[in-house]
Image: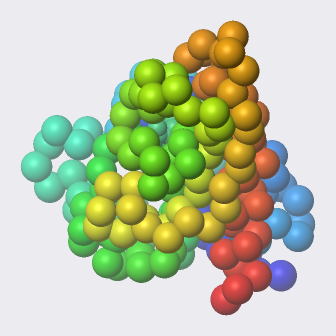
């Protein structure tokens, strides 16, 4: 099986990245993580790139032409698939169009509910009875592409934001690899 050269975009902790690195070591898993891009110089996720000797670059998205730098690197590493794993920046429409159906994102809610930021707080304020996570294709609308995989759990009265985050992320570690397998099964 020829694994797809994949770039993972991150901004922070990188726990989904870490999980994908583990999963992608399995010979039957469809992707190889060939590049990691972070728009945060201090992202903890960069430590995983170092630890597992995966090429990584920091992209300062405040600088004009930053998208060109992204494209150059995607080309350099022959990237054919992109995972947004806690990347807190909207990707350019040029990137979305170039990688149509080849960029996926993980979001900590049951989309289309609670797009954008501050998800857990809004879930609680809205007195939802259930929540979860969604892996979806990225299109030009924020958190708007077709869903690939969703995972759900029921909220307890005692759940606060931290607990919701933990429960959601535990499901994310199942949902993201599952979604990747699903995407390549359908090609
Ligand atoms: C994840 O929970 C992901 O769903 C969320 O950021 C977290 C990153 O955690 N993404 C978004 O909110 C995107 N809008 P990680 O860096 O530990 O993987």
Q: Position of residue 53 (x, y in %)?
A: 67, 43
Observer-nearest residue: 156 or 80? 156
Q: Position of residue 11 (x, y in %)?
A: 44, 35
- Which residue is farthest bottom? 187
Residue 29 located left or right of residue 114 = right
Q: Position of residue 15 (x, y in %)?
A: 65, 33
User: Does residue 21 show up?
Assistant: no
Position of residue 40 relative to residue 59, above or below, is above
Residue 153 located left or right of residue 16 = right
- Residue at 71 percent across and 45 percent down: it is 152
Residue 139 located left or right of residue 149 = left
Is the N terminus in the top left, top right, bottom left or bottom right quadrant?
A: bottom right
- Residue at 78 percent across and 48 percent down: it is 174
Which corner quadrant of the image does residue 131 belong to?
Answer: top right
User: Does residue 131 show up?
Assistant: yes
- Which residue is farthest right? 27
- Residue at 40 percent across and 55 percent down: it is 143
- Residue at 66 percent across and 56 percent down: it is 150
Observer-nearest residue: 3 or 130? 130
């Amino acid at each position: 099986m020829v694994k797809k050269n994949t770039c993972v975009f991150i901004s922070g902790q990188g726990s989904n990245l870490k999980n994908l690195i583990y999963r992608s070591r399995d010979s039957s898993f469809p992707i190889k993580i060939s590049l990691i891009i972070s728009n945060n110089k201090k992202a903890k996720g960069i430590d995983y790139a170092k630890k597992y000797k995966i090429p990584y670059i920091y992209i300062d998205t405040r600088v004009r032409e930053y998208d060109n730098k992204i494209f150059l690197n995607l080309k350099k590493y022959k990237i054919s698939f992109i995972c947004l794993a806690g990347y807190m920046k909207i990707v350019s429409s040029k990137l979305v169009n170039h990688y149509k159906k080849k960029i996926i994102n993980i979001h900590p809610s049951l989309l289309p509910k609670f797009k954008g930021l501050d998800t857990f707080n809004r879930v609680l304020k809205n007195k939802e009875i259930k929540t979860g996570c969604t892996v979806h294709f990225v299109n030009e609308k924020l958190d708007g592409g077709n869903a690939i995989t969703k995972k759900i759990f029921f909220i307890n009265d005692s759940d606060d934001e931290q607990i919701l985050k933990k429960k959601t992320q535990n499901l994310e570690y199942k949902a993201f690899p599952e979604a990747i397998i699903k995407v390549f099964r359908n090609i």
